[in-house]
Image: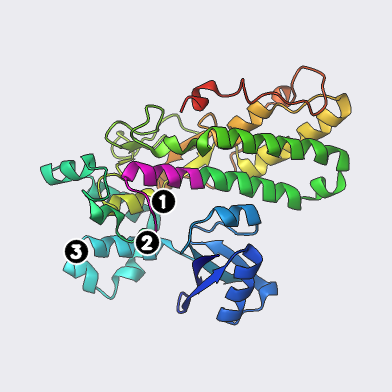
């Protein structure tokens, strides 16, 4: 039994509730907020819809859930930036009654500017950056519901949460699909795929090391500076006069918050491209009695083979038209049915972490 926080889209009500299952928390939340459960979607503050029991159980105590009525919109960008600006201790910003409406316009550009302002080197900041222990830099951990003792441990877990969400979102989208419901033969292949995904993700620790500066396979340098890899159809980030966006979330609390707006973007899109390709692969596998190529789809969904770390400005949510899956890689060459033995051979570099 864990405690959680709930609110509505207007965020004019907030309650604490306890529950041991998604259904229990959802039911109690609707009752507390006086909402008709038939018209409600439960989600986290980053917009992730919570409709999977396994994913729900992975979320920490005191997670804040938004109960959104059908038709309502929930915008968090302006509130996020307002809180960050207030934390800078600038009295003008803290007392201005117009700042929130100002931040509602052109939010991406203002985040870019704010990131640049925070990226200032001085001796005090360098000392803070090098500090890892919670005891040495308690301000960095302010407002966090975490037991992490170091910045690296917290960042590791945050990356795990992102990768874990890709797993649950993909599985949820698949199970709800008309294809999965209708094609019983293909369903067996897809179920086996996700079983293998789960095993590989566990063995790879959900790739949490991507955000861990102490790991040589992380996406940052040794002091924790991350660089934007550019939009999905670009080889580099050309912003900031050609130097590209960069940020060090290990620097201070404000930078940590700003980094939460950066995305691990699927170059080949997860929902529009990879999931339909998985369906096609299951159909092909059932027809020719071969196994689906677990490695290929695993890399597309969960690794930097297909994930690009991008600043919010470079995150293009439009359709990635030219980014396609390769049908030649959908199946294993060997002619077997549900006889998977990939875990020992797959992603050796990841297994060493």
Closer to us: 156 or 41: 156
Q: Are marks 1 and 3 in contact (CB under 8 Å)?
A: no
Q: Quadrant of residue 332?
A: top right
Side (left or right) of 135 relative to 348: left
Q: Secondary structure at mark 2?
A: helix
> Mark 1: few, some, or many residues within 10 Å (few <14, many ≥20)?
some
Looking at the image, which is closer to me, 49 or 21? 21
Residue at mark 3:
89
The total of numbered circles placed on residues is: 3
First-in-chain label (1 vs 3): 3
- SS for dot 3: loop
Q: Which mark is residue 80?
A: 2
**What is the x, y in percent for residue 334?**
78, 17
316 with respect to 199 (left or right):
left
- Horizontal and vertical percent position of residue 107: 39, 58
Please give the residue where the numbered disc 1 appears in the rendered image.
Answer: 261
Q: Which residues are magenta?
A: 145-161
Pointers 2 and 3 in contact (CB under 8 A)? Answer: no
Disc 2 from disc 3: Cα separation = 15 Å
Dominant SS of magenta comes to helix
Q: Measured from the top left, where is residue 122 in percent x and y?
A: 13, 43
């Amino acid at each position: 039994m864990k405690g959680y926080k709930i609110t509505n889209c207007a965020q004019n009500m907030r309650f604490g509730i306890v529950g041991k299952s998604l259904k229990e928390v959802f039911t109690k939340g609707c009752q507390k907020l006086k909402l008709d459960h038939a018209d409600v979607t439960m989600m986290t503050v980053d917009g992730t819809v919570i409709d999977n029991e396994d994913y729900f159980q992975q979320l920490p105590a005191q997670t804040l859930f938004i109960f959104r009525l059908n038709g309502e919109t929930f915008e968090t960008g302006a509130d996020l930036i307002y809180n960050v600006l207030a934390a800078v201790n600038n009295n003008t910003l803290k007392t201005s009654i117009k700042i929130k409406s100002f931040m509602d316009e052109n939010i991406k550009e203002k985040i870019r500017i704010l990131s640049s302002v925070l990226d200032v080197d001085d001796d005090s900041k360098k000392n803070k950056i090098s500090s890892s222990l919670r005891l040495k830099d308690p301000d960095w951990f302010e407002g966090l519901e975490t037991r992490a003792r170091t910045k690296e441990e917290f960042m590791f877990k945050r990356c795990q949460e992102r990768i874990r969400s890709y797993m649950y979102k993909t599985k949820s989208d698949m199970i709800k699909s008309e294809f999965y419901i209708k094609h019983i033969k293909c369903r067996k292949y897809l179920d086996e795929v996700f079983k293998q995904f789960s095993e590989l993700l566990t063995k790879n620790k959900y790739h949490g090391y991507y955000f861990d500066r102490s790991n040589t396979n992380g996406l940052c340098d040794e002091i924790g500076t991350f660089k934007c890899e550019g939009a999905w159809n670009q080889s580099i980030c050309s912003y900031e006069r050609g130097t590209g966006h960069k940020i060090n979330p290990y620097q201070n609390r404000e930078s940590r918050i700003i980094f939460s707006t950066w995305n691990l973007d699927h170059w080949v899109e997860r929902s529009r491209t990879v999931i339909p390709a998985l369906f096609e692969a299951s159909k092909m596998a059932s027809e020719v009695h071969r196994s689906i190529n677990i490695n290929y789809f695993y890399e597309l969904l969960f690794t930097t083979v297909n994930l690009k770390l991008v600043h919010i400005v470079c995150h293009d949510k439009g359709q990635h038209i030219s980014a396609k899956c390769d049908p030649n890689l959908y199946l294993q060459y060997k002619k077997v049915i549900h006889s998977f033995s990939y875990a020992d051979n797959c992603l050796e570099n990841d297994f060493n972490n």
